[in-house]
Amino acid sequence: MQIKPILAAMRHHKAGALLVGFQIALTLAIICNALFIIQARIARVERPSGVDESRVFVIENNWADKSSYQTIGAQIGADLIALRQLGSVEDASSTNSFPLHGAGWDNYVKMRPDQIHMTTDSSVYLSDDHTLNALGVTLIAGRNFTANEVQAAQLEEGKSWPVIIISKDLAKLLFPGGDAVGKTIYVTNTNTPSTVIGVTDTLQSHMMDGDSGSFAYNAILVPVRQLSSYVYYVVRARPGQLAAAMRDAPKALFAQSRMRIIDPKDGVMSFAQVRAKAYERDYGMAILMGIVSAVLLAITAAGIVGLTSFWVGQRRRQIGIRRALGATRTDILSYFLTENMMIGVCGVVVGTLLAIGINLWMVTRFAMAHLSITYVLTAAIILLLLGQGAVLAPALRASRVPPVEATRPV
Amino acid sequence: MLAYYLRLGIRSLRRNPILTSLMVLAIGIGVAASMTTYAVFRAVSGNPLPDKSTQLLVPQIDIWGPQSRSEGRDMPDALSYTDAMALMREHRAARQTSIYPVNYTAIPPDASREPFSVSGYATYTDFFPMFEAPFQYGGGWGAAQDAAHAAVVVISADLNQQLFGGANSVGRTIRLDDHDYQVVGVLENWNPHPRFYDVNNSDGFSDPPDFFLPFTHAVDLHTETAGNSNCYGSSGRAPGWDGWVQSDCVWVSFWAELPDAAAVQAYQSYLQGYGAEQNRAGRFHWPANAKLHDLMQWMDYEKVVPPESRISLLLSLGFLLVCLVNTVGLLLAKFMRRSAEIGVRRALGASRREIWTQFLAEAAMVGVSGGVVGLALTGVGILSIGLVFDPDYARLAHMSPELVGLTLLSALVATIGAAFYPTWRAARVQPAWQLKSN
């Protein structure tokens, strides 16, 4: 290939070549980090919750009358019976929190009462014998709670929990050897042991923060009906009846008692809405990065078209001379494509270094993961192809310069 | 002469409309992206109380000890009830208040209306003057009412609208849960961004609180906090409310107003002394450790500015940089194509200085047009910001005269900056070469 003459010609427009290279480098650096952020956010959003999401919805119920916890306990019982009797509802349960909720309660988990450092941290879901069915989560080992294991309690009473059900991931973490059922762990503040009676399939924690990643699938179900100023009802509709159940359930609750507050705006949320709300920022970030990357690529392409067109215009006479001396159209075309490829490769090399630099800085500043080389390669290929595509139109125009240009004054 | 250069500029820009609109668009998009994300960033990182933010301080007391930090816990970002009450009692600051968030149910006097949830704060009388809360009617309660655990309340303009149709309701009664409260004041619409006095419980940008009532009264009623309560090593505590308030669980925010650096210094050593005293009393088994943060340091400590906001601001600045590099390239192409014209002008006696003026004037026109395009796009960006950011943040960003000015100015400055190198090249064109080659 005619590298030498291209290099010689480039020496005459150093600034232009540098600018294009620099632009490619910067674009590459931004695009790979943006792609990486998009991918990380999407991976986060696509994690399964373990819940049968297409059929589950959640009601946030605040009590208007908080004077007696006995009354609240009895009312929750009556509410659940009313909900379960609805034709559109398969099952319902009361809880303090649920996967993807963000707010909730987590506790340190220890294997021995005298242990100083925690083994891990886990969500604690206050549940009853209907919770697993209401969430649509299956047991993979052991048994469910029975109705008379469920105790009513205010949280600060600090009671002990003799039996608990834990999620698959927590079981694997605590008992790498295998069977967790029948073993004891320490979850309460009172340092009394809890016996694992069952292990669920995948069940996500309520915690949504970036830094709780390692606890994301730790969940403990305890058989407690929480007596507090609010309660969440997790309801699973019969197949295809989600909309009907979401309409019927609040009506049934208000028919039970009017002394409750269910926010008309977001008091009843389908699990799809819970998910959308939980990952709002992630979707937002992914969209923003996507838009920026697309516009950036467009601008870089436009810049390459602009500058190359200028070079072609500037060198019409030289192109004419080459054509007159026997160069074919393909020669001219490949000259400009090669020139662009050379600039592109330099830009991509610098851009890769820049991208890694930015990523290293973001790792320390925003606790992000290290950039994988796949993104750099993908972005590099995208940019090289983009450069070739952008240069094609002006290069074709150059290849059509007739040899007779050589004889015309500029 | 400048008018003549501007006319020349327009002519030249019209000659290649595609190249020109490419530059204008690139500048416009780059500036708009930066301005939109900057508007959000400014809204979430602003100082909510600039005139006295250095006088408002938050203490941190190490009640959990170094052991808790080796387990990955930070120093508690709130106080336990015991410590907050001790600081309140000893009253070493010019003004001071303890705060915690509470939720109640408002029962409208009109029985036909549904009860609704309200959220507010239990606090002390100093809260209102310390944080410069503006009143529409009445005012805060007095220290005597704090001491008497009085059932009084300050309500928001919004709650006043809902319950009393916006009339002066001072002296009237509202019902929260099962208790009546006398209204002593109605606030104007007041919700500082961020809501600095509660960033340890909320993101700081949520809806304004509905009411404020005396801390002492809320504690009498055993009202639990609606915010965070963090416990460490308080196993075996007594059950119920008493066990909770006596525990080392932290849930009370404490603020002190200290007028000058000397007072801050004195308070810091007072806190250190308090820790040492607890140590002697056998409560802490580690050296006393207390920190004092002023308002902005506290916002920083609590990471109030969402990382998304920073990342997107940086991203759009990088984006603007690419747009500028692009503009440098295009301007270079444009100016160098006119080497012959420059040669003729120089040969006819134009100085380098005049070439500079001519080409910078042309660039300035690109900059101004880019600014106008950028302004329109910033408007679109601000309107659609809710798609990308949390609505709590998104609604804070709006088009202000400042932002308009900044958009136009940054487009102009950026373009003229980008034009320096191409103009320098243009001014160095050798007249003789250009004349000869023809």
Image (cartoon, grey):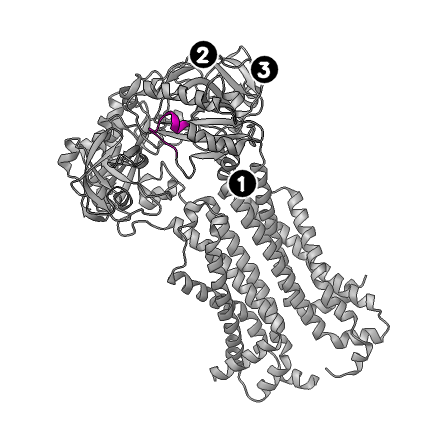
Residue B105 location, x and y as percent?
A: 30, 33
Quadrant assignment, res A138: top right
Check disc 3 and report the residue beneath it: A141
Check disc 1 and report the residue beneath it: A368
- Indicate left or right for A38 with B241 as reference: right
State which quarter of the image contains the C terminus of chain A: bottom right
Q: What amino acid is at disc 2?
A: Glu
Q: Nearer the viewer, residue B323 or B151?
A: B151
Helix or strand or loop: what does disc 1 sit on? Answer: loop
- Indicate left or right for B344 with B387 as reference: right
A202 is higher (above) or lower (below) than A296: above
Question: Residue at horizontal 42%, vertical 47%?
Answer: B393
Identify the mark at residue A326; answer none if there is no mark. Answer: none
Chain of the residue under label 1? A
Residue B303 location, x and y as percent?
A: 41, 41
Q: What amino acid is at disc 3?
A: Ala
Check disc 2 and report the residue beneath it: A149
Q: Which residues are magenta?
A: A253-262
Q: Is any atom of residue A166 visible in this view? A: yes
Question: Residue at horizontal 48%, vertical 20%?
Answer: A221
> What is the CA distance from the residue labelled 2 to the residue labelled 3?
18 Å
Residue B99 location, x and y as percent?
A: 27, 35
Please rate how many residues cluster around mark 1, counting C-alpha atoms within 10 Å: few if below 14, some from 14 to 19, many from 20: some
